[in-house]
């Protein structure tokens, strides 16, 4: 159970007790069981059930509006990412089933200075018509992975990982070989994370999403599974046309990310 | 929006995001429906592209 839902349960329980006490107090006064109650307390007993009822209605309306807004936001993300998949597929000739486009947002840690938690990237949306490859459970932080480097450099990052996939098929990397892997290929990952990720994607491109004043908000990332990359072909995500499509997606998503 | 301002808007988007970008926006506009987030995002991107175009005319 989340902290939020615990708080809601606590507040609603208190509201229910207040309302019930109000009804009981009013009834007791009416029945003559409670003689000469203080006027303020009596009014509190009379008004509290009404206040709680109105509060419940307001809460329900706010919840409904938030849910509607959330649905609209998610639909906007899904539509923009789907269109990006189709345009990138058109441009690169990668099968539309293989192109993956994700929207990532920086989640600031609350009281990070106190808890030691760092800011992380959370995925707000993802589109790939083919369900494979499945997502990893790696927590992406600043400087880790292609999206983490995009965050660190605040700039677009385009990586052709096909040579690394050939060198470490399915992420096969011993601890001894790991020592010879350069920082450029490690991309801030641990050996376990490297084994999970390398061998999965042949090409990755990440383009930053920035606010009007230049603050990094997140990124739009495109990935192509290694199985979809033909060994003899060149990399295809690094063209100006593809970068333009991804930059446009990032610009479209700026408001959505800021509002989330 | 009249034809000339639509054409100016498209030209600005093409200059900033290329022909593919303009096609992307046109297709997205067709499926936007009444989604306020997406419509607002499209309008803002077009507006910014036009402002850029005015600042740096060729």
Image: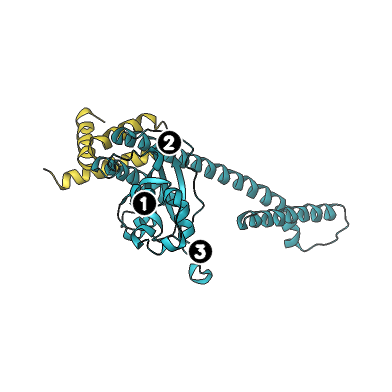
Q: Which chain is cyan?
A: A
Query: Alpha-carbon distance for marks 2 and 3?
Result: 31 Å
Does B17 sit left or right of A128 as displayed? left
Query: Alpha-carbon distance for marks 3 and 1?
Result: 37 Å
Binning the other alpha carbons within 10 Å of mark 1 as few (below 14), some (14 to 19) or many (20 upward) gives some
Above or below residue A18? Residue B33 is: above
Binning the other alpha carbons within 10 Å of mark 2 as few (below 14), some (14 to 19) or many (20 upward) gives some
Does dot 3 land on a helix, a strand or a loop? loop
Q: For this rendering, which residue is in front, A53 or A138?
A: A138
Does dot 1 land on a helix, a strand or a loop? helix
Quadrant hosting residue A17: bottom right
Residue sitting at x 85%, y 59%: A34
Give how far across and how far down residue A223 sits, in percent: 38, 44
Residue A121 seen in this snapshot: no
Tell me the mark number nearer the camera, choosing from 3 and 1: 1
Tell me the subunit letter for badge 3. Answer: A
Same chain for mark 3 and mark 1? The answer is yes
Q: Which residue is mark 3?
A: A110
Binning the other alpha carbons within 10 Å of mark 3 as few (below 14), some (14 to 19) or many (20 upward) gives few
Does dot 2 land on a helix, a strand or a loop? loop
Give how far across and how far down residue A152 sits, in percent: 35, 60
Give how far across and how far down residue B23 sits, in percent: 28, 32
Q: Which chain is yellow?
A: B
Q: Which residue is mark 2?
A: B35
Q: Which residue is mark 1?
A: A164
Does A239 sit left or right of A52 as displayed? left
Q: Which mark is residue A7?
A: none
């Amino acid at each position: 159970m989340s902290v939020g839902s615990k708080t809601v349960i606590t507040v609603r329980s208190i509201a229910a007790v207040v309302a019930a006490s109000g009804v009981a107090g009013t009834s007791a006064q009416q029945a003559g069981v409670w003689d000469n109650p203080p006027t303020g307390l009596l009014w509190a007993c009379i008004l509290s059930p009404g206040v709680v009822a109105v509060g419940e209605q307001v809460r329900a309306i706010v919840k409904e509006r938030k849910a509607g807004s959330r649905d609209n936001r998610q639909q906007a993300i899904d539509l923009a990412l789907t269109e990006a998949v189709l345009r990138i597929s058109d441009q690169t000739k990668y099968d539309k089933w293989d192109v993956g486009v994700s929207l990532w947002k920086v989640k600031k840690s609350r009281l990070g200075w106190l808890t030691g938690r760092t800011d992380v990237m959370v995925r707000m949306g993802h589109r790939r018509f083919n369900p494979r490859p499945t997502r990893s459970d790696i927590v992406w932080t600043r400087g880790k992975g292609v999206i983490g480097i995009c965050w660190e450099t605040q700039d677009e990052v385009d990586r052709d990982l096909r040579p690394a996939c050939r060198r470490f098929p399915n992420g096969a990397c011993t601890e001894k070989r790991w020592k010879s892997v350069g920082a450029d290929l490690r991309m801030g990952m641990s050996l376990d994370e490297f084994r999970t990720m390398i061998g999965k994607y042949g090409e990755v491109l990440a383009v930053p999403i920035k606010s009007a004043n230049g603050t990094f908000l997140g990124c739009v990332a495109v990935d192509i599974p290694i199985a979809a990359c033909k060994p003899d072909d060149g990399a295809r995500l690094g063209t100006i046309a593809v970068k333009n499509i991804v930059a446009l997606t990032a610009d479209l998503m700026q408001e959505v990310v800021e509002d989330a | 929006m009249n034809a000339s301002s639509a054409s100016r808007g498209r030209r600005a988007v093409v200059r900033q995001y290329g022909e593919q970008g303009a096609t992307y926006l046109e297709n997205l506009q067709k499926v936007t429906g009444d989604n306020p987030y997406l419509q607002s995002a499209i309008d803002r991107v077009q507006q910014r592209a036009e402002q850029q175009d005015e600042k740096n005319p060729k």
